[in-house]
Image: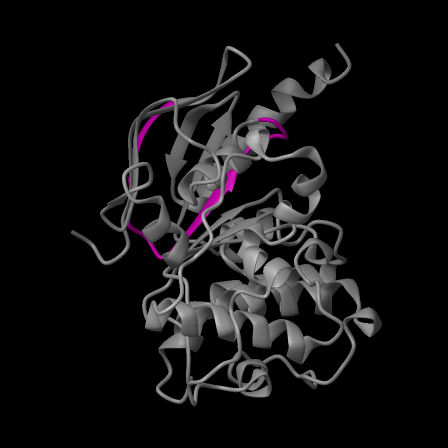
Amino acid sequence: MAKHSIKLDELTVHADGKVILGPLSVELTEPRIALLGANGSGKSTLLRTLCTLTVPTGGSASVHAVDVREKPRQIRESTALALSDPNAQLLLPTIGEDLALSLKVATRRRSRSMQSKTFHDPEHTPRLQRPRWRTRLAAGTRTASALDGSVGPRTDPGPEPQEILDALGIPLDASRAISTLSGGQRQLVALASVIATSPQLLLCDEPTTSLDVGWRREITRFLMGLADTLDRPAVPFGPRNIQVVVATHDLELAAQCDRALVLHEGQLVCDAAPNKAIAYYQQLTAGTASTLWA
């Protein structure tokens, strides 16, 4: 099996008695994959399924040979979901404190000396807990750790927050307050916070939304070069051979991926090289523009 392998076999997801995704059958082995599609096409549902936040109704999905239903905890420990709004992920006052939380989680995963908190479907989570539960979807067990203090102090001699920033090429001081950062800077720090947990699969849900052209290109450069960055011997953390899947409307970002899928009304309608998939997506959106207000 390829070192990167996401496999879907007749995967379907239902909501309110309707099929919102699938059936999908595809194997993804490329290191950088783009998901294109209109709002409501199923991109976010697919990402949430791959990190166990949405449970498949039928078929199967596996990430690096691990089934998402059979071993959800193992999936969560090797997968990270970065949200479009970095403010939903950056909970602590400074960059360094936020990254330190990720490093503590990574330490706990390595040692397995403390029991991870299991997440449940948000529909079965008490209403008052849902907003806080959702704030750390991007880093798996970071949510539980931030809320209940279960991680505890770090005991390993691992990298410090400033080393994380420097290794990732983010020119910010770890002591800087999150509140002073621009939108683009916050997105980079939010990405750094989930990468510091050493995921093998990084899922990004529209990471360039609401950013200007300059910052969209900077985030694209960062994500497209991430595997090479983490493969450098000097980088003191992170997995080797990370796989990145990005749901996006940003065609410049999609064009730099290795493969692109187009979803439409929950169906996979195009699976091709990025230039061909983008052309298909543009034709598709041109054909549906007249129905937006129907």
Decide which of 286, 112 is in the foreground and name it: 112
Q: Quadrant of residue 32?
A: bottom left
- Please give the range of residues in magenta: 23-40
Left or right of 40? Residue 88 is right
Q: Is residue 80 magenta?
A: no
Check the image and report above or below for 182 versus 169: above
Q: Position of residue 99 (x, y in %)?
A: 59, 74
Decide which of 104, 50 is in the foreground and name it: 104
Residue under the point 72% across and 39% down: 128
Decide which of 181, 106 is in the foreground and name it: 106
Decide which of 3, 217 is in the foreground and name it: 3
Q: Position of residue 206 (x, y in %)?
A: 61, 47
Q: How many marks?
A: 0
Tell me the colour scheme of the image: one colour
Q: Position of residue 267 (x, y in %)?
A: 44, 22
Q: Is residue 273 visible?
A: yes
Residue under the point 73% across and 57% down: 87
Q: Residue furthest right?
A: 180
Q: Is residue 196 visible?
A: no
Q: Quadrant of residue 155?
A: bottom left
Check the image and report above or below for 135 versus 23: below
Check the image and report above or below for 131 versus 202: above
**Position of the C terminus by quadrant:** top right
Q: Main secondary structure of the magenta part?
A: strand
Residue under the point 70% across and 49% down: 209
Q: Is residue 29 magenta?
A: yes
Q: Quadrant of residue 169?
A: bottom right
